[in-house]
Amino acid sequence: MLEMLSEHGRRAGVMTDRRGDEAEHSTTRRGILKAAGAASAGAAAATLLSTGAVAEPTDPSQGGSVPGEFRTDDYDAFPQSVGSGGPTPSGAIVWTRLDEELAAFTNGQLYLQVAADGTDGDATNADADFTDARTFTVPTAGRDEGATALAAAQDHTVRVDLDGELDPDTYYFYRFVYETGGDAPSTASPVGRLHTMPAPDASVDDVRLAVSSCNNYLHGYYGAFAHIAEEDADYHVSLGDFLYEYAGGGQQPGRDIELPSGKNVTHTLADYRHLHRTYRSDDHLQAAMERHTLIHTWDDHEIINNRWWVGDAETGFPDTRSHPFGGDPERMRRLYARGIKAMLEYLPLRVAYEDPYEADEPVEESSARQYFRLYRSFKFGDLAELFMTDERLYRSPPPKDDDDPTAASGRDLAPPSPERNQADLDRTMLGTEQYRWFLDGGTNPGSMPDTDGVTGTDATWKLHGNEVLCAALKAANAGVDGLYLNYDAWDGYEAERNLVMGRLARDEVDNYVTLTGDMHSYVAGYLKQDYKDPEQSEYVGGPRVGVEFMTPGISSNNLASAGGLPANATEDAIDEAVQTQNPHIEWFNSSRWGYTTVHISDGSLTYTAYDVDRSVDAADAPKTLLRSYRVPEGRYELQAVRSPTLDGTIGDRVAASFAGGTANDGPDVATGAGPVDGTVDAVTGDEGDDSSGGNGGSDDDGSASSADGTDSDPDDTGSSTTGSDGDGSGIPDHIEDAFERGL
């Protein structure tokens, strides 16, 4: 008879302390290892240090019998808990990771139990009943020939693909059970919940999405994820920067990170794995992953800050100027292979992937554009289709400063000039194939239904999961040639943006909504064909082609905390100033952190923005509703549902974003100097090997270091508008620095 989950230690709809007494659990694990015996210690140690390829998600076999008794309160056996993602109409991918010592020394059997919710999503994870659950046996390394699940080669993770096993548009609970064998006690994982997709032609009344982005562990706590876990959401949409490549001292107590390589930025596979383990060990992020099925696209920091592609798909290479390997094709190819491998080990993603470590050619000669495809779409019946694009793997280098021969490429923050060619027709964000797929349709990875594209879908709402700001954003109102903030965003790819927006207008695509991350800010605004045309600057009922909603950072430093906004200005004053310079923007805020929700129905789409205090490491971290906008079906009109006054000053907001903070504890809001520097100090060191153990190896070819860019001449007025301008660009240095280092 299956043992039911006890009340002790369970968590789902409400947050509880799942860990209990750490000493007790450590003792339990030691007991398991002792019971398993130490005869295989040498082999296990070797296994812990081995490397290998990322396997495809495991196909389980139905059947098997979980042990009659097992622990349900020892979650240390599953230190990163569980998660689900890659939903289809008939399944999803479920994920977990087993403690590496337990996996190596016990060589046990892994089972997966799946039980229907039965309440259409209303039941909490703590209510899960596995009495009549379906049990799947998961093939694991060391027990089944050719199996890779739980192997050291994929860092003891497992991704089980349930596609073809479940019903459409249905909630299920699941848990893993690990049978150690012998006298060692078996143990169950925390309970997770998954939600399959509706059938493509189903009639769907509404869909609720929780939306997040930019989760810098060093910058703050994850109370926002705890609140996401409590949301009545069907899916969790993550718009990139799930983790950051940096190590160093945290801005909040207990948020330091030290990489195995000893560097301040990722160099090795061990570095990337360590970051994933660290981020996924946070209780609040675990709660969100346990409760909601993930739909994720990357931005830049999953690999390295501000990255692009040079050359064609076959012989080209990824590049950046934010890493010592930048400009070196072979080392950048290896860095990409490591980052992608770790990401697919730790996130339940359904993507197209052919492992470069198993190819005939060396990894340093591989092309990520040929072995990895992330872009795909998710169709919620006839109600909505969500197009998740990849805006890093195919993009051209940013506009170049031809008057600066020392620059590897253009600055991310600069005024327009003929030399920069931001409107060059040859410059692309999406690449040719993805551009056609996005507009006209094509295949999706694996068993996911194909798409007819944004212009051809029969869904009422067309949603774009977009990494970087699509709408133009001026920093100063200087007329047609005014200053544009961020050339890492679509402002640097103006011609392709105009082509996409023009196609939407010509084909009369209605109900087009872009959901955006990246900038650690809240934005609500309109999308247009040409932001330089005065006829489109201010209008009533003019040629709008869509709306854009940006979700803020969960914890990552925003413009205020990076020193890019005047300390004595109020939030509403900044909002008004941005609107004056950008008439298509209805709301702008870059001084808070949190998440957003999107509720989609036949008659409307509603965006709601929440602030969650990143300085509080608790499930009940203070949460505030900031804004809510309704978009009626068939009209591009932002109707403010809630719009409370935000009259606090920027300086006060920044000071309050640090645990126990005062105005003197946060970074200087004029210079950006302060705790943020821990993540942007010089990145130095050699390239390591791909050891999966605790210490990454290294080559003997030392890498060059780069300056941290901290402003040494702070503005005495406390205003970001009059700071020093060392390069004469017309842009204060501290604002440039904030964008150059990826905030």
Image: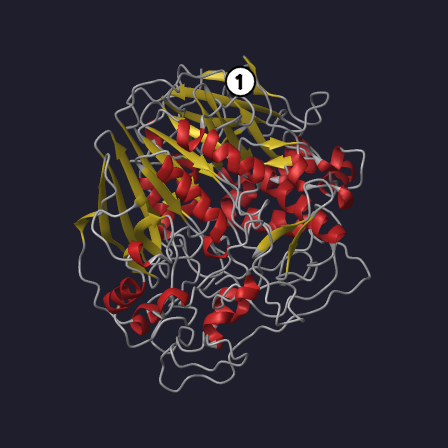
Identify the residue at image location x=28%, y=51%: 610
Is residue 21 visible from the viewing direction of this image? no
In the figure, residue 117 lies in which quadrant?
A: top left
Judged left or right of residue 490, residue 116 is left
In the figure, residue 705 lies in which quadrant?
A: bottom right
Q: In the image, residue 220 lies at what x, y percent?
A: 43, 59
Q: In the image, residue 239 lies at what x, y percent?
A: 44, 45
Judged left or right of residue 220, residue 98 is right
- Relative to 274, say whether 79 is above or below: above
Judged left or right of residue 34, residue 64 is left
Identify the residue at image location x=50%, y=19%: 68
Q: Categorize mark 1 by other alpha carbons within 10 Å: few (<14), some (14-19), many (20+).
A: many
Q: Look at mark 1 in the image and give the residue it sits on.
A: 136
Compare residues 147 and 415 and report the one nearer the observer.
415
Q: In the image, residue 47 lies at what x, y percent?
A: 74, 38
- Relative to 138, say whether 411 is above or below: below
Q: Which colour scheme is used?
A: secondary structure
Identify the residue at image location x=39%, y=81%: 722
Identify the residue at image location x=24%, y=29%: 602
Compare residues 443 and 47 and report the one nearer the observer.
443
Q: In the image, residue 139 lies at what x, y percent?
A: 63, 22
- Relative to 356, say whether 413 is above or below: below
